[in-house]
Amino acid sequence: MDYKKYEKRLIENITMYEGCWLWGGVVKGFGYGRMSIGSRTDGTRKQISTHRLSYLIYRGEIGDKCVLHKCDMPSCVNPAHLFLGTHGDNNRDREAKGRGVYLSGAANKNSKHVQSEIDEIREKHSSGDYTYRRLAKEYGFKSHKSIIDIIREKTWSPKPPKTRSEL
């Protein structure tokens, strides 16, 4: 596919900010820009991440690689800020930039429970008198599977996990 023909559309939707070319069009999950390319009539229409499109336009083929950001700005499409890497490189880059930390228990700002409730749940479970479903209902969990994760210390562990891979 000739990606160069999308250069004008890409450029029309960017704002310069401290060396970054920030995409101002449609933004999807985690702040990455998205753009439609191809044609409906010939069946080549597809969505592409704008940082990948920028790489294809200005730097060349990507193959099965990931396009990573030196600047750590997901909406940046500046080709000077983009480089290729493997999925492993992408994961290591994410961890090195501190985006791979997932907080557990009370440290997670989205938690609806407090440590004292979790301690009660574990204590009641260890007594043998409470089922997972009963505990879930009593403490307002949507699923008994959350209770299983608490009991097994997959969530609300004494030492919170640092990365997804440690979950």
Image: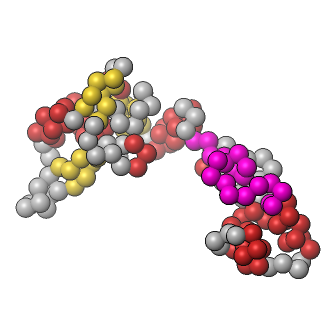
Looking at the image, can residue 65 be seen? no
The stretch in magenta equals: 100-118
Taking the image as shown, residue 36 lies to the left or right of residue 78, namely left
Reply above or below: 76 against 140: above
Looking at the image, can residue 121 be seen? yes
Furthest residue toward top: 18
Furthest residue toward right: 127
Helix, strand or loop: magenta stretch: loop
Q: Residue at x 87, y 71 (%)?
A: 124
Q: State the image coordinates of residue 43 (x, y, percent, origin top left).
A: 13, 62
Q: Residue at x 86, y 64 (%)?
A: 120
Q: State the image coordinates of residue 157 (x, y, percent, origin top left).
A: 77, 53
Q: Residue at x 31, y 31 (%)?
A: 22
Quadrant in the picture for residue 121: bottom right
Taking the image as shown, residue 99 lies to the left or right of residue 158, namely left
Q: State the image coordinates of residue 88 (x, y, percent, origin top left).
A: 50, 42
Q: Is residue 7 magenta?
A: no
Taking the image as shown, residue 151 lies to the left or right of residue 78, namely right
Taking the image as shown, residue 109 lies to the left or right of residue 123, namely left
Q: Quadrant of the C terminus?
A: bottom right
Q: Residue at x 70, y 70 (%)?
A: 140
